Amino acid sequence: MDRDKILLTPGPLTTTLRTKLAMLKDWGSWDADFNAVTASVRASLLDIVHGADSHVVVPLQGSGTFSVEAAVATLVPRDGHVLVLDNGAYCKRAAKLTTLMGREATSLDFDEAQPVDAEVLETYLQKDTSITHVVMIHCETGAGVLNPLQAVADVCARFKVGLIVDAMSSFAALEIDARTTRFDALIAASGKCLEGVPGMGFVFIRKEVLAACEGRSQSLAMDLYDQYVYMEKTGQWRFTPPTHVVVALAEAISQFKEEGGQPARLARYTRNYQTLVAGMQALGFRPFLDPAVQAPIIVTFHAPEVPGYSFKDFYAAVRARGFLLYPGKLTTVETFRVGCIGAIDTHEIEQAVHAIELALRDLVIAA
Ligand SMILES: *Cc1c(COP(=O)(O)O)cnc(C)c1O
């Protein structure tokens, strides 16, 4: 059958037919019609974080990591020192890209089953005064932990260090308010909770730090300052824009607004999350995280205790029934992940749980 599989993955994710149909058109990258789409997307993005007064938003071609890399390169001086609050795989990726771009990076390590701790950060900043920027991941998609953005932002503000937030898997679903949460940069992408298609990221940059960003990036294509200046001057993207991705995002944002914005999206994802966990627990699956630290974005489950279990076989058995799972990303325990995000609701989640039940039966019979 050619029905699309339901993606239970944290991007790309299942999109609506309206979003897909928006891509069936060619756009000129210099054309006024396309520039108007870019401008409206940028204005809408700023509205979502209430950031029009305090921040600018700079879109960038590429997957989400491209924008994280661009944000670090654009914000952090070449002799800057970045402290990464590390409780998972995406934190490690941020530390690695910082080092590769020639900035000094230090990791403050936390348990991957727990949120990072703002008090530990505070103690660290008291003794190491060389730190210029802190990098944190809002929702650590590796295990699914929600990190305390407000508490970390408050500590960074008090110590006058810059804060760079990877909010890739939380933006538009969890509340982020630039009026009350101080960040120098915050990064997200088209193909996550806004339910667009993948292909572009965007970075909110605090206006007060923008001017100092000129000339910091060692990359031409990933320089967000240049991208910003050019876009302000011409209304155009500096290099070839992902036109179809941009128009799909504009359409996805219209639906986001129709649904009721961030609170409505969070409510739907929370229902998905609750339905998923209840259904999986009834099948005997155990979530890896304490529910108190879990974001309603992606859930890590312990692998089923079936002799000879392999994720590959389990994935294939669930896939045959129309649903795509996501592998685990933990270092020590065998797990798999199920996303709660995308253009799906509790009906798809119930069907997914049923597919998992049937797949598990296959594995048990084969064992
Ligand atoms: C998805 C994601 C990214 C970006 O990953 P890409 O594969 O580059 O799109 C970065 N950080 C977090 C926390 C994510 O969930």
Image (spheres, rainbow, N blue to C red):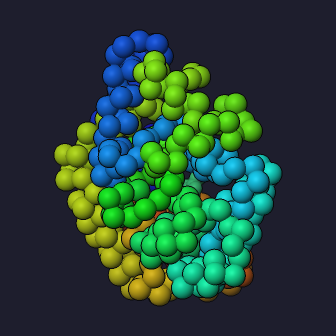
In this image, 93 relative to 347: left or right? Answer: right
Return the residue nearer the eye: 239 or 350.
239
Q: In this view of the protein, can residue 333 be seen by the observer?
A: yes
Tag count: 0
Which quarter of the image is occupied by the C terminus?
A: bottom right
Give the residue displayed 54% in from the left and 85% down from the top.
119
**Is 307 displayed left or right of 164 in the figure?**
right
Residue at the image point whose x is 78% and y is 60% from the top: 104
Percent position (x, y) of residue 103?
A: 76, 55
Q: Residue at x 69, y 50 (%)?
A: 77
| Quarter of the figure with residue 355 | bottom left
Q: Position of residue 220 (x, y in %)?
A: 70, 31
Image quadrant where residue 163 sits: bottom right
Q: Residue at x 65, y 62 (%)?
A: 132
Residue 242: percent from the left, percent from the top? Answer: 52, 28
| Along the line of sight, the residue nearer the viewer: 2 or 120 | 120
Between residues 251 and 151, which one lies in front from this camera angle? 151
Vertical order, 78 against 300 (above or below) = above
Instruction: Pick whichever, 4 or 166, lies toward us.
Output: 166
Q: For the N terminus, which image quadrant?
A: top left
Residue 29 position in % (x across, y down): 48, 16
Residue 10 visible in the picture:
no
Question: In the figure, 140 relative to 15: above or below?
Answer: below
Quarter of the rendering containing residue 2 = top left
- In what quadrant does ligand 1 lie? bottom right
